[in-house]
Image (cartoon, rainbow, N blue to C red):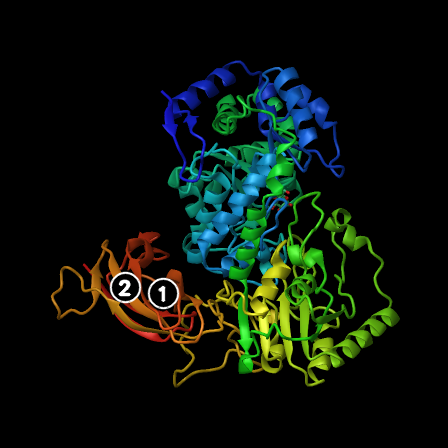
Amino acid sequence: MSKKITGATEKATLPLPSEAEVAARVEALVGRMSLEEKVGQLTQIGAADFVQGPKPEDVIRKGGAGSVLWLNDTKQFNALQKLAVEESPSKIPLLFALDVIHGYRTIFPVPLAMASSWDPSVAERAQTVAAREARAAGLHWTFGPMLDIARDARWGRIVEGAGEDPFLGAAMASAQVRGFQGPFLGAPDRVVACAKHFAGYGAADGGRDYDPVYLPEVLLRNVYFPPFEAAAKAGVGTFMSAYMDLNDVPASGNRFLLRDVLRDEWGFQGFVVSDAFAVASLVTQGFARDGRDAAFRALSAGVDMDMASNTYPQHLAGLVQDGKLDLTVIDEAVRRILAIKVRMGLFEQPYTDESKLAQVIALPEHRQEARLAAQRSMVLLRNEGRLLPLAKSLKNMAVIGPLADSMEATEGSWMVFGHTPAAVTVLKGIRAKLPGARVEYAPGPEIGRDIPSWFDALNPEAKKAPQTPEQAEAAFQMAVAMARDADVVVMVLGENADMAGEAASRASLDLPGRQEELLKTVVALGKPVVLVLLNGRPLSIGWAAENVPAILEAWEPGSEGGHAVADILFGDANPGGKLPVAFPRKGSHAPLYYARNLTHSPEGSMMYNPRYWDGLPVPLYPFGFGLSYTTFSIANLKVAAPQACTGACGPGVKVGGSVAVTADVTNTGPVVGDEVVQLYIHQKAGSDSRPMRELKGFERVTLEPGETRTVIFVLGPAELGHWSTNAGKWVQDAEDFDLWVGADSLATLHADLAVVR
Ligand code: BGC
């Protein structure tokens, strides 16, 4: 029986196949497929020039591929699909997949920036637009959201995730899944999402991308898994297994991750794809003996689809024929993939209307969403003497810096394959805001990676010849001269798009190149200077934090980024974002995160010993921090009394129960603005030591001047329990807790909470 379902955000009413219908259709298909075709469904082929091997057309015609990636061309999608559904033996449609990480044509702020909004609806709306555009282009499946917790800013892929915290990360994870997939898998104008990279990838030794990861179960369960579990609960269709070794077992051959946790504990029903070439890499990593062993171990561990390594098609059939691999393991994986194809409606509608993309990308509401998302993602780090917002009556400005007019840096890391950047840069945004003013621009010296990347081959910018030292010096002097002539200087500094992302780790978090030298020289001129940062990771900006009066962290803000920066600089939008990751004073302090355990010598105690003798061990800007053009007070923190206690036992909750925590937030300043009220907990004793603070609630509220709102958080077993090393399982202790509510992770407004039996 088909149920009629109307999704909350969908106009169309679709017949949604029931579980039984999907299963029956899948069984019918499996029943008539040869072993080779089954293996084909488990094979994802790359259609890019850099992939070697047989031509995609030949593979598809024989039924040798279930999915295609690294292709971004509607006509070609249709041409390949025709081969699959008309010429291949079982006529099963292909799934077209690509990394659509923060927008397809309308580029949104990078995920780290979206997490800075502390507003999951920003991420949901962004990924709804991304899905609509991607689906119009003919894509069915995106490799996002990226859910790796990243506590080490040296790790370049920090830009793709939601930062250091599992609670914020989990909220952003479900929001992105809802955005990509809509209210149900197969909803119109949506794509299948992929929770990646399962799991632990962000904890690479030394922040070096791909390096091994050693994470005890207590960290996996309490910190690294929650965003993935949230995605599974939100109904994500697919998971991607990570590259690196996790506790000496590569994630793409890791049965504990892919079967014990993902399937047996979380009940995940979708399919798992490996990361690119990761099945073959099991040999390179010194785990599998050869390709045959790699294919056997990856599939047995739970990798259903081999991304681009050609290992499954070479070996799986032979393994079955030799009696080494049970056919049921293959059938199980095939069923999961076919079930998604059925749910996506690909058998009914395998092709894409080639005129649709042009209509969809022209929608002005997409640009408007991107601009709003960028405004809400930016974090005001400093505003001495209320230099910001600037007056629109300014007549003579200079916009300086290598990123001021860079479309690449504005749209940021993980651009869609084949996409040509088309961003409103900060320079263009400011010029549009001040049409009558003189707004001069000088880039100063260029910045670039010291060591090129393999990905440079895909990036035309990277092919430009670097400046000579003489050219760089001339550019430096020109920028200083221009700043000298201006009344106000906006410096746009940070990192190029290729300085964060995959294979883009850094040993230092300093501003690269001569940017800090240029900043110091310009500040020495004595003009009002605003620093706008475009970057994909926290940077060590200790000098700027003391010497530049206004600093706006704009991250990599996307296609409308320059307009959004100008909106904030000139007060048309009030910044309300907060850091989803701490800013360390130095790269060598990484990993540095707020949710650390207490030591025997805590800060502030009599026996306190400094951690480093050559600098403060605390962040320059803490997790959760961000300023506004208005001010807020947060007061009146209250915890409801437990039902079992009457007055005498104080505020508390029974094990397994829930308690409401409330606080009042007031806009005490002159303009409307947003505050993100944050709740942190600390369990004082119990089965295990617990972090000194853990985020367990947040809400972004918009308040008029003088307005007060009561924010309500609920703490239940999910928030108050933890995975215990001592018990070897999830526990909820009857113990005392500290609670803090405030505007960042250093919040001081405190209350006690007792958890009682
Ligand atoms: C990355 C993945 C990505 C895949 C496909 C890999 O190099 O690690 O995040 O989804 O390529 O492009």
Q: Specify the quadrant that holds the C terminus.
A: bottom left
- Label 2 sits on what residue type? Val
Closer to the camera in the image, 548 or 201: 548
Please, is residue 330 above or below residue 238 in the view?
Answer: above
Residue 679's label in the rendered image is: 1
Label whose residue precedes the other's in the sequence (1 or 2): 2
Element marked by disc 1:
strand
Q: Is residue 491 left or right of residue 711?
A: right
Residue 243's label in the rendered image is: none
Tell whether circle 2 marks a residue whose Cβ is less than 8 angstroms from ligand 1. Answer: no
Q: Quadrant of residue 657?
A: bottom left
Q: Are marks 1 and 2 in contact (CB under 8 Å)?
A: yes
- Label 1 sits on what residue type? Leu
Q: Residues within 10 Å of mark 1 (few under 14, many from 20)?
A: many
Closer to the camera in the image, 131 or 657: 131
Please, is residue 259 above or below residue 17 in the view?
Answer: below
Q: Residue 133 placed where, x, y %?
A: 59, 40
What is the C-alpha distance between the residues marked 1 and 2?
Answer: 9 Å
- Residue sitting at x 79%, y 78%: 481
Please, is residue 454 above or below residue 85 in the view?
Answer: below
Residue 661's label in the rendered image is: 2
Closer to the camera in the image, 344 or 652: 344
Q: Residue 8 placed where, x, y %?
A: 40, 39
